[in-house]
Structures are given as C-alpha cells and as structure tokens.
C-alpha cells in the first residue's frame, strides 16, 4: 500500500498537503470557523478560565505551537504539559479548566491516563485525535477528529501538520464563541489555512531534492542542533526528535534565545545547526534576533542551515545552506517550516541505509505507561 513510494514515511510526507486540507474541510462557514462536532458546547467554552493541553512526543510539540494560536485568538491562558508529567504531579485542574489531549493514535497510555485523571478532578476533556473511535476520544467529553488519514510509519509526519491545523481551527472556533476574534481575522486565517496545502506542495516540488542531497552529504554527522524562536521553537524540538528517532543521530532543539545561557558552549567548528528563521516582514523583531543568533554561532564555526522565507536575503551572508519556504503569516509558518525538517530526517536515515518506517526500539503507538 506504499503506492510506489520507497517507504511509508516518504508517502506520508508527500501527503502533508492533503492532511492539512482534509482537516480544514467542512469546518468553515460564511468566513468563520465552525467545527460541527463542537456546536452545543458554547456555554462550556465561555465559562472556562484556562486550558491545559496534554500529549507526548511529537503530539506535545504540536500543542506547544497551538498554545500561541489559542492565546492570541481566544485570549485564554494555555498550559502545555507532557501527559506523563501531568498525571503524576497532582495537577491543579477543576471544572473551570478544559483539558485538551492531542494524539495521533488515540491509544497512547500516558495521554489516556492524563485524560482520566483530568476527568477524576472534574475538568472537561476534549480529544483532538487522528484515529476514529480510539480509546482517548471515547474517554473524552468531546472530540475533534483530524483527517490526516492512517499513518503507518512510526515517526509521525503528516499527523503533526494536521495536529497543528486542528489546534488552529479549535483556537478560531473558541475565539469566535468567546467573541475575541474579529471577523476579518477569522476570514484572513481561513484564507491562510486554505493556501497552506499548495505552499507545502511548493516545498516538496522545489526543495525536496536539495534537502535529500544535503542529508546525503551529512550521512556521517554525529550531532546536530536545531534552533527556533516563538512558534519556531517547538519546530526546532520536532526537527531534533525526528532526526534522533529515525537516523539515531544525537540532536537537540533549543530556543534560540537560550543559546547564550548554555548551549552555545556546544558549538564548535563544523557543527551543523538548523535555524528556523521567522518572516522578515511578518515578524521583523524576531527575525533580526534570529539573524544575530545565526551570526553568533557562525562566528564560532557552526555550519548554519537556515530555513527561511523565499526572498529573505538577510540570512544569505551567514548561512551555509538556505532551505526556502513560501511566505505565510508568522503564526502559520510552523506548518511550512517543519516540512524540510521531516524530509531531512528521512533523507539522512535513508543515506545511512536505515529502515525509516520501523526505527529500532520504537512502536507506533505506546500503549504502556
Ligand atoms: C514521533 C512520534 C512520537 C508520538 C508520541 C505520541 O515521531 O511518533 O513521539 O508522537 O508517541 O503518539 P500519539 O500522537 O499517537 O499519542
């Protein structure tokens, strides 16, 4: 069922555009986001004072991205917590808190136990899940299904972009109900969501070969760093996780602002560092901060691989490689910036001759605590 693709991972990365498009489908009405499954919950959404999102691994990174969107649009405080940490620290949640769980499989035991604990404490629970009828959605008060389609490769790729998309739709739905998102922001955001699939396709068509070539050259690399700021920070974490998982290379993701507080000591000549660069026009302040971070690591000999908006010339003097992504509003950029990182992790594992679909020591769904 790989349909001619060399691996499920390759097939699933190629399906990232559809994963986003299908998740948005049927969830907009007259220029507003309306998630039909959530109609009838308006009173609940108006009454809550806080949201806690729980998940594990890649799903938790999507939650970190979602936090920015929910806080910006729905103006409600969001905490993100690893499900297994939430479960065992006697969390302060009650009836005024909505606990959102995020899971591709819907069977992750750590996440399921967090949901059960939230219910026991009187919180309402919402599951954002890719697998119809799985245990976590069945144990939750409400569910929003993602429509990424079945994901077979152990490393999550298309589900990740669908998870961010699902969280953004939820944020816009919540913002509409709570009256915090002006109609024009709803409309513009829907336009952005609708253009993401073709932008992802642009990356696949124009950058995939370049990235795979780069991965091939880097097959002997021992260690790689990933840096990002704001919504680029969880993307750096995701890039590092994916590389560890399938290519067994030591990789770390950091918030770029944290560099000088420690991690910069790791930088030595030749160390490859991926940097997620914010949009120069959309987020000029963040952009210039990240460009100075690039200069700092470059001065210490790092090999900088920048993921930057097409047309961003400021990175050119300092980057050894530039992987281009199309223009998008800053909040939407993570869905594009992660695509080169997924391709890179797969390319490197392939270059090392590894089984990208079945990495050692890992299972597709982790049904033990
Ligand atoms: C990473 C990966 C894992 C899962 C995590 C949660 O590529 O696949 O980190 O994201 O085990 O799984 P779900 O989303 O099924 O709860």
Image: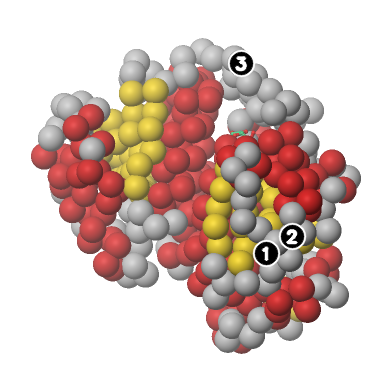
Labels 2 and 3: the sequence-earlier one: 2
Q: Residue 137: x percent and y percent?
A: 82, 49
- Quadrant occupied by the N terminus: top right
Pick the front one: 118 or 241: 118
Query: Which secondary structure, mark 1?
Result: strand
Q: Which residue is mark 2?
A: 123
Up-down: is 289 above or below 42?
Answer: above
Query: Which secondary structure, mark 3?
Result: loop
Examine the image and state in which quarter residue 213 appears. top left
What residue is at 46 percent from the left and 68 percent from the top? Answer: 329
Judge from the rendering whether residue 2 lies leftward or rightward of residue 353; answer left or right: right
Judge from the rendering whether residue 203 lies leftward or rightward of residue 17; answer left or right: left
Q: Which residue is mark 3?
A: 361
Judge from the rendering whether residue 135 lies leftward or rightward of residue 327; answer left or right: right
Examine the image and state in which quarter residue 180 appears. bottom right
The residue carrying pointer 1 sits among few (fewer than 14), some (14 to 19) or many (20 or more) residues within 10 Å by Cα, namely many
Up-down: is 214 above or below 28?
Answer: above
CA gap, disc 2 to disc 3?
A: 35 Å
């Amino acid at each position: 069922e790989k349909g001619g693709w060399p691996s499920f991972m390759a097939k699933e990365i190629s399906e990232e555009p559809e994963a986003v498009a299908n998740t948005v489908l049927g969830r907009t009405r007259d220029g507003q986001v309306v998630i039909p499954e959530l109609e009838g919950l308006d009173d609940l959404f108006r009454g809550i004072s806080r949201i806690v999102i729980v998940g594990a691994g890649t799903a938790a990174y999507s939650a970190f991205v979602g936090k920015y969107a929910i806080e910006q649009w729905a103006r409600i405080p969001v905490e993100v917590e690893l499900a297994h940490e939430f479960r065992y620290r006697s969390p302060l949640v009650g009836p005024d808190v909505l606990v959102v769980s995020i899971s591709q499989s819907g069977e992750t035991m750590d996440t399921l136990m967090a949901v059960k604990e939230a219910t026991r404490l009187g919180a309402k629970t919402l599951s954002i899940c890719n697998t119809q009828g799985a245990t976590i959605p069945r144990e939750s008060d409400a569910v929003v299904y993602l429509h990424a389609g079945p994901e077979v490769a152990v490393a999550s790729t298309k589900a990740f972009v669908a998870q961010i998309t699902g969280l953004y739709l939820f944020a816009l739905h919540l913002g509409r109900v709570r009256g915090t998102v002006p109609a024009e922001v709803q409309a513009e955001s829907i336009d952005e969501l609708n253009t993401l699939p073709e932008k992802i396709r642009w990356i696949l068509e124009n950058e995939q070969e370049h990235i795979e070539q780069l991965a091939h050259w880097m097959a002997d690399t021992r260690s790689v760093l990933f840096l990002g700021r704001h919504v680029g920070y969880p993307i750096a974490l995701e890039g590092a996780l994916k590389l560890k998982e399938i290519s067994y290379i030591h990789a770390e993701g950091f918030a770029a602002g944290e560099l000088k507080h420690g991690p910069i000591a790791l930088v030595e000549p030749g160390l490859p560092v991926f940097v997620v660069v914010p949009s120069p026009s959309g987020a000029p302040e963040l952009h210039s901060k990240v460009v100075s971070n690039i200069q700092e690591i470059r001065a210490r000999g790092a090999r900088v691989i920048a993921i930057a908006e097409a047309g961003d010339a400021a990175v050119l003097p300092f980057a050894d490689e530039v992987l281009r992504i199309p223009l998008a509003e800053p909040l939407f950029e993570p869905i594009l910036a992660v695509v080169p990182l997924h391709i890179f992790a797969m390319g490197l594992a392939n270059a090392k001759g590894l089984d990208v679909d079945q990495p050692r020591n890992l299972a597709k769904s982790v049904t033990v605590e």
